[in-house]
Image (cartoon, rainbow, N blue to C red):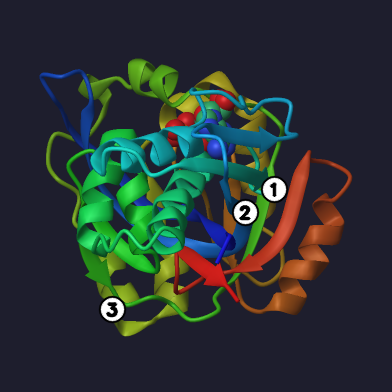
Amino acid sequence: MQNIRVRAHAKINLYLDVVGKRQDGYHNLETIFHSIDLHDDVIIRKQDTKEITVHCTHPAVPSDARNLAYRAAQCLNDAVGGIGGIAIDLHKRIPVAAGLAGGSADAAAVLHGVNALFGLGFTRETLMHFGAQLGADVPFCLHGGAAFGQGIGDQLTPLPALPDLPLLLLNPGIEISTAAVFKKLNFSLTKPKKKDIIIRTYIEKGDVLGIGKNLYNLLEMPVFSQYPEIAALKTELSTQAGCYGALMSGSGATLFAVMHDTEAAHRSESHFKNKVRFCTTTVTSPVGVYIND
Ligand code: ATP
């Protein structure tokens, strides 16, 4: 086998609370991740030179060592003391810097794909361990489905994946830096006591209405105060027919709505199509990375 095509699925956060600041400057989170069907395609080829190369036509995505996909290949190359040349083609569909973990998904796909293509034999747990060194969301992207995340989001407890839950995603085209959002977070304004994760029970029961009504993301507070237009968009999304609840994913700016059915999602998609930069109907996915035949 000379090449492999891997689907790199985006994620959303159905719940996100910040529970403390760490000495290393990062924050401890409690979050519920879910993979979604929206994905990048990552094509990995063996090449004769010893180089790692990344090709990506998206203007906001670097093709050099700053690319997380490159760093994932480099990480495996270093771990085994040299694999050989690797060429990576990224076909981006996941909006960039949008709270959907696009870069982390690509890195996870490269770890999974290179491991398979070169027959390295690393377990998923070992790949997740490598992934944690690349970015906080990479372990979840390898894990896929649904999980409760703690620490910086890298300590995962599996949750039952929600099958084919219809979702509408909206991105207003505002690129938000995760670091800047955390900097703006005012701990004195946040609740000192840990919020009970009621939504987790609803996920375990597969109660979609309960999930929709209990979506929560603390990071909405600093983002909405800086960008009131995103808050207004969320209100408009929440009041669409068939919407069980809406939330900002991660550090934004993507908003998602849990919808009653795909038809309702498509109707709302038509409503928003010309108002936002990116709008799509998707569903939850049981996997984070997947090798296509
Ligand atoms: P984060 O929470 O890390 O900001 P995100 O999901 O909001 O993640 P990404 O799409 O991963 O956002 O992009 C964040 C930054 O990472 C971008 O500014 C981009 O230049 C850089 N980046 C590096 N590699 C990639 C990649 N393979 N795909 C997308 N962005 C990448």
Residue at 13% x, 25% y: name it. Answer: 22
Q: Residues within 10 Å of mark 3 (few under 14, many from 20)?
A: few
Q: Would you say 155 lies left or right of 2 here?
A: left
Residue occupied by mark 1: 91
Q: Earlier in the sequence, mark 1 or mark 3?
A: 1
Residue position marked by numbered label 2 in the rendering: 43
| Towards the viewer: 181 or 123 | 123
Instruction: Measure how far apart labels 1 and 3 are at the Cα level.
Output: 34 Å
According to the image, label 3 marks what residue?
204
Q: Which tag is nearer the camera, tag 2 or tag 1?
A: 2
Identify whether 185 is placed above or below 284.
above
User: Which mark, residue 244?
Assistant: none
Contact check, label 2 and label 1, Cβ < 8 Å: yes
Q: Position of residue 257 (x, y in %)?
A: 59, 59
Q: Quadrant of residue 180?
A: top left
Give me the residue at 69% from left, 48% from top: 91
